[in-house]
Image (cartoon, rainbow, N blue to C red):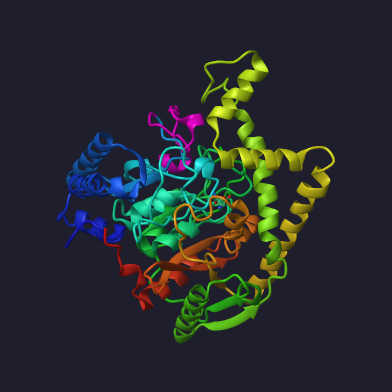
Amino acid sequence: MSIIGATAGDLLSRMDRGELSSVEVTTAYLDRIAEFDAKVGAFLSVDRDGALKQAAVVDQKRQARQPLGALAGIPVGVKDVLCTAGQTTTCASRMLQNFVPPYDAHVVTRLKTADAVLIGKTNMDEFAMGSTTENSAFQVTHNPWDLERTPGGSSGGSAAAVSAGMAPLSLGTDTGGSIRQPAGFCSVVGLKPTYGRVSRYGLVAYASSLDQVGPFANDVAGAAILAEVISGHDPRDSTCVNAPVPSYLQNLEQPLAGLRVGIAKEHFVAGLSPEVERTVRTAVDVYKSLGAEIKEVSLPHAKYGVAVYYLIAPCEASSNLARYDGVHYGHRASQFNNMIDMYATSRGEGFGTEVKRRIMLGTYALSAGYYEAYYVKALKVRRLIRQDYDQAFQQIDVLASPVSPNPAFKIGEHLADPLAMYLEDIYTISANLAGLPGISIPAGFTATGMPIGLQLLAAPFEEERLLRAARMFEKATDWHKQQPKL
Ligand code: GLN
């Protein structure tokens, strides 16, 4: 049986049985990257030597029957927005092109403690702002299902890496859909945990009240293992909740009796592609056939999600990105006339177009006179969106919806029209505004063979239920077994 395309769980048990070593597994993925990543462009850097060294250490531990972590010997790709000590962390920005952090992000420390093998850093939209990975300052990532199309974004590299069999697992971040949307576009599983479930320490901030780290995997169990490894309290992130993390794997195979699946009438409106709608409705029928009760709920404020997000996220971004001033770290212009000019030129050279657009939008919305009218109003509507969900989740366990209104678009298609691109985030962003956990799972394909995902959302800290519900669907369908031909 092959290594490429195998699930993390399968690789773990074969290594435990002594049929495979981590060096063999890691070598297979490194070779796969060497062979195909010129086409896909998923990785910004690959740590061949470091990965093989770590794999050898894990193999020795296994042979010596020493205690092993939950991901012992499994290669994992890490989005380049997460700090890795001694390894560049660029955020796909010229601003941080040569930045080598002196410390690991909390989730990276957790990976290392779990004996995972860090295989490389994945491409993304600059500072996680975007939906196509085209905003990377360094390279475009291509969708493994059709190289002329985008893998989605901003965690497009992490999604494409798993989809193309270049890593069984990877980490991404999701501020407005950046895990779920690329997972849907690439036919892999992507989980955004509840806000506060996973520490943001060492995650380079985009919009701090929305950012969350989460797993990509080629099956639900893989996402469950990785989610369990990274979740839990860390005092270095004051928003990280001190609550026990249940085992996501333990009951994963047990179907949920009496599951109540909701659909929101506001989700099936103009702008939704008929193929996506059909796929989501078929998926809901699958739940029905598994004994779930289907209930219609209402999310009256859902339609304001895009407007609210594209105020709050740029406001927070304008504040967070103020730190790149050419002084502390990051890019500094080589020529300038005075101090103010040094700031302006360094930032002008270091940031790309989309990042500049958002800094300007956010700075404008936060300025005197507009703060109350835009930012504070957006915060109020954010609360209403959360209340809609609180009410809905009194009647249902999970909400089923599209991930995106359309399947993966062509590279370059939306670049000239940022607003059209922002509108594509309509189904994912409200989970971030409300802090809810959400998952995207493979649910079908268009007539031309492009993947379509199903999104499930749940009440805060209900990841266990969400993953079990996702596993019920996965067990009943074959979509996740299909792999792109490269
Ligand atoms: N597409 C959204 C944006 O551009 C979401 C990005 C994200 O989740 N990081 O902001």
Horizontal and vertical percent position of residue 136: 47, 42
Q: Quadrant of the N terminus?
A: bottom left
Mainly helix, strand or loop, the magenta region?
loop
Horizontal and vertical percent position of residue 81: 48, 40
What residue appears at the point 39 percent right and 74 percent down from the top-left corner? Answer: 447
State the residue in front, 218 or 107: 218
Residue at the extreme left: 19
What residue appears at the point 30 percent right and 62 percent down from the top-left corner? Answer: 484
Span highlighted in magenta in the image? 86-109
Residue at the extreme right: 369
State the residue in front, 471 or 217: 217
Horizontal and vertical percent position of residue 247: 43, 60
451 relative to 268 in the view: left or right:
left
Q: Is residue 93 magenta?
A: yes
Camera sees residue 68: no
323 relative to 162 in the view: left or right:
right
What residue appears at the point 36 percent right and 63 percent down from the top-left corner? Answer: 219
Q: Is residue 158 magenta?
A: no
Please, is residue 402 above or below residue 375 in the view? below
State the residue in front, 147 or 403: 147
Number of callouts in the render? Answer: 0
Horizontal and vertical percent position of residue 461: 56, 60
214 relative to 461 in the view: left or right:
left
Camera sees residue 24: yes
State the residue in front, 426 or 394: 426
Quarter of the image for residue 356 reads top right
Quarter of the image for residue 144 reads bottom left
Q: Quadrant of the C terminus?
A: bottom left
